Amino acid sequence: MKDARLLFDDIYRRNQAAVLRFITAKCLSISDIDDIYQDTFLNVYRSLCNTEKPIENEEAWVISIAKKSISRYYGLLAKLRGRISDSLSRLPDKKLLEEIPAEVDVEMLVADRSLCDDIFDTVSSMPPDVQRIVYMYFILDMTPGEIARELKLHESTVKNRLYRTLDRIRRSYKRRETL
């Protein structure tokens, strides 16, 4: 297709939010969202380059590609899970620290990064539905009502899980500060 790039840009702009919400609602872990999202739009672009047919229902077409990406991702992940260990450190390496301007307090930067990693680990240890709610609320900037509709839950359930999670994180880090 000659103008696949322009068509892709339009499709991406019109459907990015819906696809991100769909993937977030269906994924097993919030750490998988970005990979699946990128894979989905890579496959959308490839499909546009390989077809001349007009797309009738654009959103449904992109969502169907997202479904395939989710299925393929978790199939590959299951195959690789036993072979690859996640032993990479989350702290910045020496080369990254050298690129930080002198006026930045490196100790505070590492402490902030460490706190973010600890909070991420805490949220990651929670059930997948709670992870999705936290991700949708803070990253996708969705309201509890929107989250409830997307996950097919009652709004009170979403609020309850969100506020209990925030309270758990708050209490956990208050205890650490007093130690």
Image (spheres, rainbow, N blue to C red):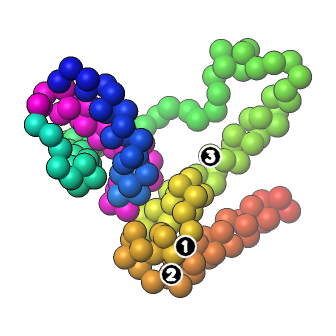
User: On the rendered structure, is 5 left or right of 164?
Assistant: left
Q: Which residue is mark 1?
A: 144
Residue 5 is inside the magenta segment: no
Label 2 CA crowd tier, 10 Å (few <14, some 14–19, many 20+) = some
Q: Please tell me whether mark 2 sits on a helix, a strand or a loop.
A: helix
User: On the rendered structure, is 148 left or right of 170?
Assistant: left
The secondary structure that most of the magenta stretch takes on is helix
Residue 37 is inside the magenta segment: yes
* Amino acid under disc 2: Glu
Q: Please tell me whether mark 1 sits on a helix, a strand or a loop.
A: helix
Q: Residue at x 33, y 40 (%)?
A: 11
Residue nearer the viewer, 136 or 92: 136
Q: Taking the image as drawn, is residue 163 in sight?
A: yes
Quick check: 117 above or below 26? above
Q: Residue at x 64, y 32 (%)?
A: 91
Q: Which mark is residue 75?
A: none
Q: Which residues are magenta?
A: 23-52
Q: Is the C terminus in the top left, top right, bottom left or bottom right quadrant?
A: bottom right
* Amino acid under disc 3: Asp
